[in-house]
Image (cartoon, rainbow, N blue to C red):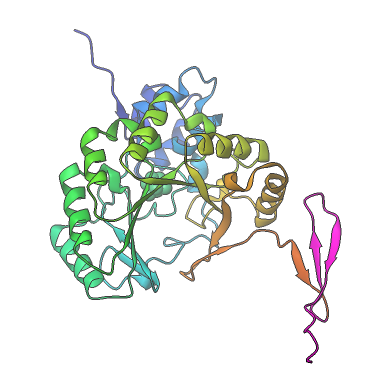
Amino acid sequence: MSVAKKTRYTSVSDLKQAGLLPGCDSHAYEDLAGRYAVGVNAQVERTLAGTDNPLLDPVGRQYLPSPEELKVLPEELGDPIGDLPHSPVKGIVHRYPDRVLLKISNICAVYCRYCFRREMVGPGQDVFSDDDLEAALGYIEATPAIWEVILTGGDPLVLSARRLEDVLSRLNRISHVQVVRIHSRVPVADPQRITDTICNVLKSSGRPIYLVIHINHAQEITPEVEVALAQLRAAGCSLLSQSVLLKGVNDDPAVLESLFRRLIGLHVKPYYLHHPDLAVGTGHFRVTIERGREIMRALQGRLSGICLPRYVLDIPGGYGKVPVEHSYAVLLDEGRYVVEDIDGNLHFYPPRVEAADG
Ligand code: SF4
C-alpha cells in the first residue's frame, strides 16, 4: 500500500523526514521544536525542488526553522511594533487616527521565520471568536474617524469565503469606513486558495479593496502566483506589495530590482520595504539601517519610480511607521539646500526670495 505524500509540514520532524533540513544538527533542532509555529506547504516545497541546500535558498530561508532562532538578543521584543499598547479591544490596533488594523485570524498558510507577530500567530494561540468580532466591529462603528480598515492577522485570506464575506459586508454597512485593505501572504505562498469563490466575495465588496501581498524574492513568483494575481486583479482589487529586507534573502540591490520589476510587470505596485522588526530570535535576518539605505540608493538610480517602494521602519514600542530612506536634500543656512543627485554629485538649491512690494 502506498503512503500518501504529505502536503503540509508543521514540525521539525516532518521537515526532516521530507529532506528539507539536510545535515541539521538534531540536538539544536530538538530545542527549537514547538518554540514557534512551523508551516511549509506544497507550494513552498515545489519552489524548493531541485535546490542543493534548501536552508541556503532565499525561499527556504524564509520558512525553514534554524537553531539561530534560539539566540535571543537583549533588544528583541515579544511585541516589537507595539500592537498591545494600541489595542482598545481584542483584534483592533488603533495607532493612527484614520485607520485601524483588524486582526481577524491568528493562523497563516505558512509561517515565516522572521515574523514580527511570531509570539501571537500559529496553532494554539488565543482564537478570535465571534464575540471578539462583534466587539471589534462595534469599536469601528462607534469611531467615526476610522476611514480605512486593514484586515490582517495572521492571514485574513485563510478564512473561509463565508467568514470573509460576512466581515466585508458588515464593514460595508459602516458609512465612515471608505476603504478596506487586506494584508496577505496567501496569493504568493498558497495561490490555490485564490478561488473563484474568494474572488467573487472580494468583487462584491461595496468598498475599494487594496490587497497588499507579502513577497520577498522574485523566485516566489511561480506560474500559479501569476494566475492568482491576475484573478485578484480581475476581481477589482488594487494590488500592492510589501517586502521585508532580510539578510541572506534579498539584501542585495540586484535581487530587489528583479523582484520589483517583476511585480510591476504583474500590475503590483511595490509599496513598502520594511526594515526587519526586533522580533525575538530573528537577529540572523537583520541588516543595519545603513545597509538598507545603501540598497535603496542603488535602486533609486536604476529603477523607474513606479518600481520603488518606501523603505520604512516601525519604531519599536508602537510609535508608528516612518520612512528611513537617505535624505537627498539637506538644509544649510538661510534657507539654502544642498541636494545630492543619483550619482552622488552635490548641487545647491536657493532659498525662496520674497518679491519686493510695489
Ligand atoms: S504570513 Fe505574516 S503573520 Fe503569518 S507568519 Fe508570515 S509574517 Fe507572520
Count of number-bearing discs: 0
Query: Residue 216 location, x and y as percent?
Result: 51, 40
Q: At which x and y percent is residue 25?
A: 49, 31
Picture layout, residue 296 above or below residue 256 = below
- Quadrant for the N terminus, please: top left
- Residue at point 25%, 33% (across, down): 195
Residue 77 in percent (x, y) is at 47, 61
Of the pair 173 and 275, the residue shown nearer to us? 173
- Front residue of this view, candidates 265 and 128: 265
> Residue 214 at what x, y percent from top left?
44, 44
Of all residues, the one furthest to the top in this rendering is: 1
- Residue at 49% x, 51% y: name it: 281
Residue 69 visible somewhere in the drawing: yes
Q: Quadrant of residue 142?
A: bottom left
Residue farthest toward the bottom in the current orientation of the protein = 358
Q: Main secondary structure of the magenta part?
A: loop
- Residue 341 in the magenta stretch? The answer is yes
Question: Is 19 located above or below residue 146 in the figure?
Answer: above
**Quadrant, the C terminus:** bottom right
In this rendered view, identify the residue nearer to me: 342 or 106. 342
Residue drawn 39% across the image and 51% down it:
118
Image point 21% across, 49% down: which residue?
164
Q: Is residue 35 visible?
A: no
Q: Give above or below for 130 relative to 51.
A: below
Is 292 inside the magenta-drawn segment?
A: no
Work out which residue is located at the far front of the displayed protein and give it.
Answer: 358
Describe residue 138's horizontal placement relative to residue 240 as left or right.
left
Query: Picture quarter containing residue 192?
Result: top left
Magenta residues span 334-358
Q: Is residue 249 left or right of residue 187?
A: right
